[in-house]
Image: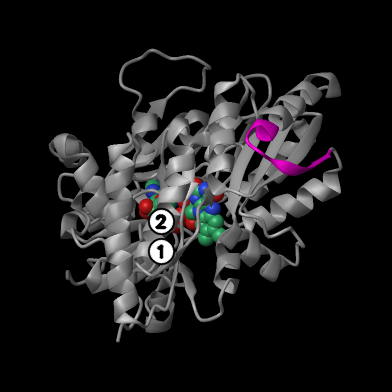
Amino acid sequence: MSDINFEKLRAIVGEANLLRDPADLYVYGSDSSVHEGMPQAVVRPMTVEQVQELLRYADGERIPVIPRGSGSGMCGQVVPVQGGIVLDMKGMNRILEINLQDGYCRVEPGVVDDDLNKALKPHGVFYPPTPASSMVATIGGELANNASGTRSVKYGAARDAILAMKVVLAGGELVSFGATTRVAASGYPLERLMVGSEGTLGVIVEAALRFVPIPRLRCLGIAMFNQLGEAGDAISDIMGSGCQPSMLELVDKIAITAANKAEKLGLPEVEAILLFEADGMAKETIDPEIEKFRAICERHNGFGFEFSYDEKERARIFAARSKLFPSLSKYDERLASTSLADDMAVPFSKMAETANKIHEIAERHGLVMTAYGHCGAGCMHTKILMDTEKGEHWEAAQRAVAEIYEYVRSVGGTTSAEHGIGLSKAAAFKREKASVLGLMRGIKKVFDPNNIMNPGKLMDGPEDWVGETHLRYQKS
Ligand SMILES: Cc1cc2nc3c(=O)[nH]c(=O)nc-3n(C[C@H](O)[C@H](O)[C@H](O)COP(=O)(O)OP(=O)(O)OC[C@H]3O[C@@H](n4cnc5c(N)ncnc54)[C@H](O)[C@@H]3O)c2cc1C
């Protein structure tokens, strides 16, 4: 590990924005994953110039730099596996412009998603990628992970919302990518390359984002199923029918039970529930979508339909869905919910098979695993519920995860739908992208010749999928 000149850091960001106490450093050593590390310093830049100076210094000394938003990532993206300086970007949190005429807003990277949407609401527009963690997730973190959410089925992921971006490169140079126009055909779309780059190519210091009109009406529908596969088949038929849901979520029995325990929802504990939402400006356009949803679900033996235009009821269900990941730990108090094989994307036609496969693999390995997610967008989540102190649970989980990703690849899916790669999924990612890893490393070298930007992640992440050396848990 390189020596850090704390005087230098203090001179750049000031005493109040430099942390070096071990207790503070510990807090910045992990995220929502199973991994942990220890940075040597944490700094909170407040200006673009400070970011530039910090990177100039770190590049000169070959010190790793890890940009960080709120640390809600699920795969260890912000874990400082090689020490170095964590750049806490939350201090750069100004909304710089809301330009209704040209249809974009300009923000600093530390703006929290919900805060942006609060500011946009009076103008009748919203920024749609919105993950379930929108109360904490920053725009910088969402862009760097290509986050998406419940409404991405209709409105797209973070990559679909980006128009332009300012980035500080590893050597301290400030560059501008993209344009705020609605169309652009001016060379490589580097702003889109930055989306999903997980802090490995540079520091996003400003972003121009598209927004869309808030629909006047939203109707939420619920359907129940006695077979998980039938719910999965209904999803593929809905998506193939020309129906345009603004939300289509699958929740399996394990997740329903956990949500009931955590949030006292009182949902019937059937094998699966589909949550469907259609939005628009008039009931006349929404009702036919709802009818289509009902007819397709009935064809797959769906029952227990409920539909509501009521804002409060929708908000209650929506809030419970947002809290599903933490709720899973309530399923069985002895088991913790871990983000291991936590998300993947599969073709719609494989949704039913994938959901069943997850349960089958879990059972075979003596584990509890859920199948849920923004399935209308092709996104399937699993969480492994396990005793994190038991060595045999880790071994079983390791085998199960390898099988799941093998299966996902075999049906034309991909390693991550929205949570990214980080450390947890690096091994599966490298197997999937074997033919282009050289190209990716070449791109990284152009952006960051000295490999200081978030090293040891993505294509340079560990072969051992749980990153044995950076596990937060003591296995016995
Ligand atoms: C309960 C819960 C629910 C979640 N639900 C969803 C969901 O529905 N959809 C979804 O997509 N994700 C979800 N997530 C995962 C996570 O919240 C998102 O990926 C989120 O976008 C991360 O934002 P963050 O600010 O916490 O970023 P961090 O975790 O701090 O960082 C994420 C990545 O961004 C990089 N980064 C951060 N800021 C910058 C910057 N300025 N410049 C360059 N790189 C930067 C980091 O280096 C890191 O690689 C969930 C997490 C939790 C805990």
Q: Amino acid at mark 2?
A: Glu
242 in relation to 391, above or below: above
Asked whether mark 2 lies closer than 8 Å to ligand 1, one says: no
Query: Which residues lie in the magenta part?
Result: 297-308
Q: State the residue lying farthest toward the bottom.
A: 476
For label 1, the residue is 363
| Residue depicted at 66% across the width and 49% down the height | 115
Secondary structure under badge 1? helix
Q: Is residue 107 visible?
A: no
Residue wearing tag 2: 360
Whole-number angstrom distance, CA of label 1 to CA of label 2: 5 Å
Place of residue 28 in the rendered image (x, y in percent of width and height, measured from the top left): 41, 70
Q: Secondary structure at mark 2?
A: helix
Q: Residue at x 80, y 25 (%)?
A: 287
Q: Residues within 10 Å of mark 2 (few under 14, many from 20)?
A: some
Tell me whether circle 1 and circle 2 mark residues in contact (CB < 8 Å): yes
* Residue 30 in picture, x, y percent from top left: 39, 69
